[in-house]
Amino acid sequence: MRSIIRVLVNAFALWLTTIIVGGAGDHGFWIVPFAPDTWGHIGTLLLVALVFGLVNATLGRVLRAITGILYLVTLGLFGLIVNGALVWVIAWLSDLVGFGLHVDGFWWGVLGALVLSVLSGLMNALLGTRKERQA
């Protein structure tokens, strides 16, 4: 149940990120829905949030393990670059299927990843989805 709530939170944070970073129109960081109606937009946000979670859980762990020393040297700031790269992977996968997340450039991806992580972290903290289960 917690995983479903986290995907919903990430989808909402992704929507807010597209508003904050992308603004109005197709520039910066935006979502291209698979259908022109409201449900198509919501479905696209949910699908991108799910794929982002899967990519972050698999490729993100590998990248963080490989670049662990850079995290230490930069006091964690290299995480912004890794998260920007993960956003680029999601945008590349979205481009293959023709809908989903689109990013104008690498630095837009880094900015979007920063805003997305802050928003989803705040919302997960407010909802308590980060707490581990106690046996």
Image: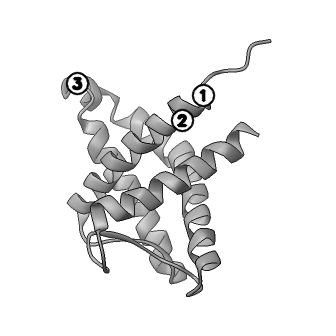
Residue type at mark 3 is Leu
- For the C terminus, which image quadrant? top right
**Taking 121 as reference, is 39 left or right?**
right
Crowd class of label 3 (few under 14; some 14 to 19; many from 20; radius 10 Å): few
Q: Quadrant of residue 80?
A: top left
Nearer the observer, 65 or 79: 79
Residue 28: which quarter of the image? bottom left
Q: Earlier in the sequence, mark 2 or mark 3?
A: 3
The answer to whether 129 appears left or right of 59 in the picture is right
**Is label 2 in a helix, a strand or a loop?**
helix
Q: Which mark is residue 75?
A: 3
Q: Nearer the viewer, residue 72 or 126?
A: 126
Q: Are marks 1 and 3 in contact (CB under 8 Å)?
A: no
Q: CA distance from mark 2 to mark 3?
A: 24 Å
Residue on which the image places disc 2: 124
Residue pictured at 27% horizontal, 53% vertical: 110
- Tell me residue 94's x, y (percent): 49, 73
Q: CA distance from mark 1 to mark 3?
A: 27 Å
Dot 3: element: loop
Distance CA(mark 2)–CA(mark 1): 6 Å
Q: Amino acid at mark 2?
A: Asn
Q: Residue at x 45, y 36 (%)?
A: 121
Near-viewer residue (56 or 5): 5
Q: Which mark is residue 128?
A: 1
Q: Nearer the viewer, residue 117 or 71?
A: 117
